Image (cartoon, helix red, strand yellow):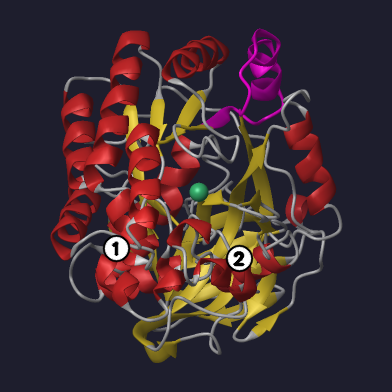
């Protein structure tokens, strides 16, 4: 076990916390160890029995996990005539309740405005509000030559991960393949990574008006209008660009079996292509869209059939899918209701920032689909490593930020709107029997969640200045 010699005198002034007797996850090892926090950092891990500290926490019977890192959230997101209800106050609060101590949010370029404003805008939004640490992925919507020249500056300012959409033309978000290639090249030269929302726009633009005309307006037709093949087609195209440019490519919210295969093959061929999926694809299938309240589960890519869901779990297990994020997109019920009679008018998105850790434990670890160390990789270690936050975040290591979750693996509870803390007036996660519950959350040594109470001071969250490490390649 890792142990750093403690020099009492030099460090005497900083507050110390000892978390005793919990089972900690360190890489592939799960072992009973104590953790000493000093100030905002983890100071030591080992058998620290008898060591004095300002505060003691008994973690007997609990799991001690690194704070979760969610690199896919949409706060204050203006989309489909509405805005997400999670801002830096409500969104980071719900994150904290879900054991998430770092988030990275998307910030759309306003056409005609400099890209650097995407970071400045989020600094304004977070000021005096953020409870946990936060970073920014700029989203390019109009890739002019001038905008591309700004990419090195964004990398310098700690936002080296830029997202583009291959669809949502009518929302003004779509970027064509030629421009994707230029952006990939610019990012490669600057030390950045392109994140792609991969769905084939032509297929969707052909299907949606046809279905509406035929009166096929129910929520399930949202899924039928954007079939798995349209996702796979787009994934294939952007993978081809990654092969040609040799740039690092990250496929967000992958939800197709063919996508898993394509990513596996490409990685096997030695190219730097990485994929994530999201909680809801592992928990729900497209059957939810057939319910009367099916609009709750309208998201893009859509939920898939049980066979595809099984393939996604397989990819999560065997490493072709490197991580799982929430894609938190929290629209109000009134906004979702715009889609009551027309699936194409429903804002696409599911609020989920709080549920990822407990649900992936309950449905993944407790049901034997993934190991506990794999869960930690998927939601903490890999997002931190791949998005430029390691070793500060995502791992329990002396010297890392003391972002720690205490988790009771035996607790049984029912997940629903009442037991969650997200700001939406509805929940997609209704009456789900859940095994395992977060009991305490520390962020940089501060106890921010204690049972059902949030103790964090608003505005304590810090901007995460990120730098990618290209020597890091998660295993296939
Ligand atoms: Zn998203």
Q: Is residue 268 or residue 151 the one in the foreground?
A: 151
Q: Is residue 366 left or right of residue 314?
A: right
Place of residue 464 in the rendered image (x, y in percent of width and height, measured from the top left)? 67, 42
Q: In the figure, 306 relative to 454: above or below?
A: above
The outermost residue toward the left is: 307
Q: Which residue is mark 2?
A: 331
Callout 2: SS = loop
Q: CA distance from mark 2 to mark 1?
A: 21 Å
Q: Is residue 121 left or right of residue 308?
A: right
Place of residue 219 in the rendered image (x, y in percent of width and height, measured from the top left)? 38, 67
Region of the chain picked out in magenta, as a range = 140-163
Q: Is mark 1 within 8 Å of ligand 1?
A: no
Q: In the image, what residue occupies the spot 50% across and 15% down?
A: 179
Instruction: Specify few, some or many for label 1: CA neighbours under 10 Å numbering under 14, 14-19, or 20 or more.
Output: many
Residue 282 numbered tag: 1
Q: Does any portion of residue 403 appear in the rendered image?
A: no
């Amino acid at each position: 076990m890792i142990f750093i010699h403690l020099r009492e005198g030099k460090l005497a002034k900083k507050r110390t916390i000892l978390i005793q007797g919990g089972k900690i996850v360190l890489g592939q090892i799960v072992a009973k160890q104590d953790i000493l926090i000093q100030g905002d950092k983890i100071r030591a891990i080992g058998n620290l029995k008898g060591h004095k500290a300002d505060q003691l926490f008994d973690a007997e019977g609990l799991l001690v996990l690194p704070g979760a890192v969610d690199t896919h959230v949409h706060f204050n997101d203006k989309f489909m005539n509405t805005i997400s209800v999670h801002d830096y106050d409500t969104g980071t609060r719900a994150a904290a309740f879900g054991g998430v101590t770092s988030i990275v949010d998307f910030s759309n370029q306003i056409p005609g405005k400099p890209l650097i404003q995407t970071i400045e805008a989020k600094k304004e939004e977070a000021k005096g509000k953020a409870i946990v640490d936060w970073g920014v992925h700029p989203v390019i919507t109009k890739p002019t030559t001038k905008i591309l020249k700004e990419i090195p500056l964004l990398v310098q300012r700690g936002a080296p991960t830029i997202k583009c959409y291959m669809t949502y033309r009518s929302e003004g978000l779509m970027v064509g393949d030629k421009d994707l290639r230029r952006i990939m090249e610019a990012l490669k030269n600057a030390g950045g990574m392109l994140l792609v929302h991969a769905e084939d726009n032509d297929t969707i633009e052909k299907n949606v008006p046809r279905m509406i005309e035929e009166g096929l307006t129910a929520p399930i037709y949202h899924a039928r209008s954007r079939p798995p093949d349209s996702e796979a087609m787009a994934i294939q195209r952007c993978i081809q660009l990654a092969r040609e440019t040799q740039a690092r490519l990250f496929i967000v919210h992958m939800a197709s079996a063919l996508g898993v295969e394509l990513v596996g093959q490409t990685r096997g061929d030695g190219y730097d292509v990485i994929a994530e999926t999201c909680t809801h694809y592992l928990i729900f299938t497209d059957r939810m869209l057939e319910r009367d309240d099916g609009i709750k589960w309208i998201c893009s890519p859509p939920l898939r059939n049980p066979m595809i869901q099984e393939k996604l779990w397989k990819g999560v297990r065997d490493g072709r899918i490197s991580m799982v994020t929430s894609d938190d997109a929290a629209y109000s019920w009134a906004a979702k209701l715009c889609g009551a009679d027309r699936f194409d008018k429903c804002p696409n998105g599911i609020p989920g920032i709080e549920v990822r850790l407990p649900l992936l434990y309950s449905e993944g670890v407790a049901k034997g689909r993934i190991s506990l160390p794999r869960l930690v990789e998927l939601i903490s270690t890999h997002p931190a490593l791949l998005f430029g936050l390691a070793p500060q975040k995502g791992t329990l290591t002396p010297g890392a930020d003391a972002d720690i979750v205490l988790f009771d693996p035996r607790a049984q509870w029912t997940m629903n709107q009442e037991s969650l803390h997200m700001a939406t007036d509805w929940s997609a996660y209704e009456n789900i029997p859940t095994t395992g519950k977060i009991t305490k959350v520390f962020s940089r040594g501060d106890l921010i969640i204690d049972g059902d109470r949030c103790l964090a001071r608003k505005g304590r969250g810090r901007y995460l200045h990120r730098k990618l490490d290209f020597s890091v390649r998660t295993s296939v």
